[in-house]
Image (cartoon, helix red, strand yellow):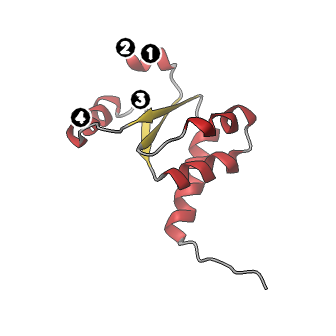
Amino acid sequence: MAKTTHVSEAKKSAVKKTAEAVKNHKTVMFVSVKNLPSSQLQKIKKDLRGKAEIISAKKSVILRAIDETKISEIVKLKENVTEDMALLFSNDDGFELSA
């Protein structure tokens, strides 16, 4: 008999939300937030408000969301996902966001 594990509704919702964001945005950036002070991350979020959406999630949630998209170009990026990651989504060009 196979052992089943309980996955919380919050985690399922986070995976679904992240996968939908990947599918629905033109620009997806994987951003390391390791050693980034929370005040600096909050300032970045504030500066990008209206231009981009930032989702900080556990590595397992990000990896499951990538798998759920079934987009081969995105799935190839799984090897770059490490701990302390955030995903940045936008319909603007990445270079326009950095300016």
Task: Identify the residue under disc 1.
Answer: 96
Nearest to N terminus: mark 4 or mark 1: 4
Question: What is the three-letter code of the residue carrying label 4?
Answer: Gln
For the residues carrying marks 4 and 1, which lies nearer the camera in this image? Answer: 4
**Callout 4: few (<14), some (14-19), or many (20+) C-alpha neighbours within 10 Å?**
few
The x and y percentages for residue 74 are: 66, 35
| Mark sitting earlier along the chain (1/3) | 3
Q: Is residue 11 above or below residue 18?
A: below
Residue 66 position in % (x across, y down): 64, 45
Looking at the image, which residue is at 41% across and 35% down?
32
C-alpha gap between disc 2 and disc 3: 12 Å
Q: Residue 40 has which mark?
A: 4
Q: Residue furthest right?
A: 1
The alpha-carbon separation of the residues under discs 3 and 4 comes to: 18 Å
Q: Earlier in the sequence, mark 3 or mark 4?
A: 4
Q: Which residue is mark 2?
A: 99
**Relative to the observer, which residue lies in front, 21 or 41?**
41
Numbered tag placed on residue 51 in the rendering: 3
Secondary element type, mark 4? helix
Q: Amino acid at mark 2?
A: Ala
Distance in Å between CA atoms under marks 1 and 3: 10 Å
Distance, label 2 to label 4, CA atoms, is 17 Å
The three-letter amino acid code for the residue at tag 3 is Lys
Residue drawn 54% across the image and 71% down it: 9
